[in-house]
Amino acid sequence: MRDRRKGYVVLLLILFVVLISACVDDKSHEGVINPTPTPTLTPASSPTHTPKDRPAPDAGALARDFAADIPLIDAHSQVDQYVDLNKVIQLMDRGGVACTILSTRGEVRPEDLVSFASNYPGRVIPAVKTKGQIYAEDDEKYYKFLKKQVNMGQYGAMAEVPM
């Protein structure tokens, strides 16, 4: 059973390489992260040199500004049944994150994650769920669950694999 697990790990690593290519080449995030220009810090306007009558720059705005030039990729996010998936996009926008590799925990079904990600191509990359109780027990159901996700053909990454 362990040799079989190693085979799945290799397959999932290949998916990860494909994901990174998609995040780097995809331009669908352009214009979404920074819809309006934001100020950049210069020595005269940095928080340590800000006059008392002028507020310090917004850190979130600065992050969005930098993300417009260098795409920020959140390479390890997870959601469970208690997280509103739409909140993920709001948080990404607030933090200037161009692309998120998103995996599930708990009772979120693979179909739900894939459906959500399909609404945000290039921004949300669904990751194959690799952990859980069936993994810990080395249950045959674990391999069926992995195979189901991979065979959906809509995953672009994998979550971490404990060895």
Image (cartoon, helix red, strand yellow):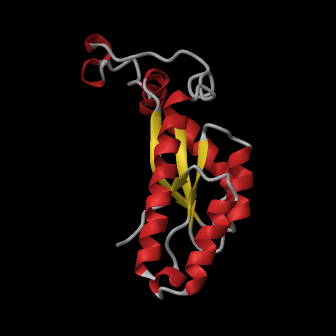
- Can you give x and y, in whole percent of width and height, for residue 11 in the image? 49, 59
Where residue 160 sits: x, y (%)? 43, 63
Along the viewing direction, whichever of 131 and 14 lies nearer the viewer: 14
**Which quarter of the rendered picture does the C terminus lie within?**
bottom left
Q: Residue at x 60, y 39 (%)?
A: 123
Q: Is residue 121 above or below residue 45?
A: below
Query: Which of the 4 image quarters holds residue 148?
Result: bottom right
The percent coordinates of residue 105 (x first, y second) are: 56, 69
Q: Residue at x 65, y 74 (%)?
A: 107
- Residue 84 falls in image quadrant: bottom right
Residue 81 visible? no
Q: Does residue 48 appear to the left or right of 85 in the view shown? A: left
**Residue at the spot x=52%, y=77% of the render?**
132
- Where 155 sits versus 148, above or below? above
| Left or right, 37 with reference to 41 | right
Q: Quadrant of residue 122?
A: top right
- Left or right of 110 in this view: 10: left
Seen in the picture, residue 107 relative to 149 is either above or below; the reply is: below
**Percent x, y for residue 37?**
54, 15
